[in-house]
Image: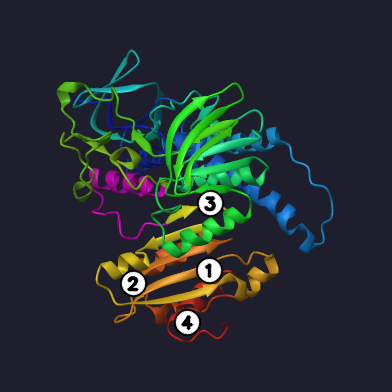
Amino acid sequence: MAYDYDIVVIGGGPAGYAGAIRAAQLKKRVLCVERDKLGGICLNWGCIPTKALLTNAHLIELITRHGKAFGYSGDAKWDFGQIIGRSRTVAGNLNKGIEGLFKKYKVDSLFGTAKVIDAHTVQVGDKKVTAESFVIATGVRPRPMPGAEFDGQTILSYKEAMSLTTQPKSMIIIGGGPIGLEFGYFYNAIGTKVTLVELMDRILPGEDEEVSKALLTSLTKRGMQIFTSSKTGKVTKTNTGVKVEVETPQGPKTLEADKLLVSIGVLGNVENLFDDKLGVELFKSHIKADPKNGYVTNVPSIYAVGDVIGPPWLAHVAHHEALCCIERLCGHSDRTVDYSNIPGCTYTDPGVASVGLTEKAARDAGHEVRIGRFPFVASGRAQAADETEGFVKLVFDAKYGELLGAHLIGSQATELIAELVMAKKLEATEEDIIHAMHPHPTFSEAIMEAAGQGMGECVHI
């Protein structure tokens, strides 16, 4: 049978557009179906525009918190509308960039809601398209909280939180993961009173405990009110905003604010995606796909990648899964994703980044560990930038010197982590990191110094 396309990719986010471009590079006839804008949530409403907002927050804090140290004595004023507008402009520019890449590589695009009606046919609106294979990359959406459904006005998801027309005076955030903390940091930095509630016993519960504790201390000093080990109860909308009942270790509390941001997880975008007779296997709200077999589902012509197949819900993971899937699908390679070497980043200030095992996880796995630490307060470059919060913590196997994990908190943490991802991929040891000459003065020296501290060879602390 002659199909309209070799591959139809459903979803135009970090997995979908990257997979479509890679397939076209491998000389396949490719169509990308997207129901909204190319770039998906990440580019248009997530990773990119939030980092534009966080850059603004960092600039504001640089002036308001560090200005005196640098000799600044003015009265800084900020335009909330312009801050939001700039973030939207950044997203729009990159959206156009993807359109340009599609034209360059001859990737066709079709906008609308897709439904796969049989193993080789997708319907988009009133149009039917056939393909030899489908790659599903439809992503996820925010999980609503029972009793507090999103209304886009008072009870917000991240999408509304980054496009408000006026700055709220106060905000309650439910969820102490990366998204909740990044928005909390942003709004706190621009003067909104922020209260954050986390069910677990610490914020960023997936990170190393020392890092979580250090970030909690830093954000609290900056004015955020954070409740951990706290359960959210009844949510009531009021004439002025919202009221939230919370059970805390100190007893029940009633919190009130202009806005409530709910950031408690995600749901896969799978509703009405497949005709029931196809029988594509799902788990919870995600598609079951086999990473060891090119991300194929239980239907041989249908593959799935990215957030829609489950955690970790990270754009860079989605990107690499898509490339691996497409290359396997095209018979080009047997490349796989190493899920033990995935960096995680939280773009607060100080920023948090990690890869590999935490100290606790390494010990629980039976490793005898050696820890190397170096504080940024001892870094000449950090002193020069007046960015001395935080540290580098490296977890090594004490017997073999293998790098098991890396955990950073500090101004440049999210940039520095890439070096440690590469080091872990290349199976670098403590000595390799110590002997790799790092330029002076840089934040990156803290990595070399941390490895040296673990071996008793650090000369700066």
Is 131 or 369 nearer to us in this picture? 369
Residue 362 is tagged as: none
Is 5 or 281 nearer to us in this picture? 281
How is the protein colored in the picture? rainbow
Q: Earlier in the sequence, mark 2 or mark 1?
A: 1
- Read off the residue under disc 2: 427
x%, y% of residue 165? Answer: 64, 28
Residue 452 is tagged as: 4
- Magenta range: 316-343
- Read off the residue under disc 1: 391
Distance from Cα at disc 3 to Cα at disc 2: 27 Å
Q: Earlier in the sequence, mark 4 or mark 3?
A: 3
Q: Dividing the picture into quarters, in which one does residue 290 lie?
A: top left
x%, y% of residue 344? Answer: 42, 55
Distance from Cα at disc 2 to Cα at disc 1: 23 Å
Q: Earlier in the sequence, mark 3 or mark 1?
A: 3
In the image, residue 131 above or below residue 454: above
Disc 1 secondary structure class? strand
Q: Earlier in the sequence, mark 2 or mark 4?
A: 2
Mark 1 touching mark 4, by CB under 8 A? Answer: no
Dot 2 surroundings within 10 Å: few (below 14), some, or many (20 or more)?
A: few
Looking at the rendered structure, the kind of residue marked 2 is Glu
Looking at the rendered structure, the kind of residue marked 3 is Tyr
- Read off the residue under disc 3: 347
Q: Earlier in the sequence, mark 3 or mark 2?
A: 3
Asked whether residue 145 is in view, the answer is: yes
Quadrant location, the C terminus:
bottom right
In the image, residue 317 lies in the stretch drawn in magenta = yes
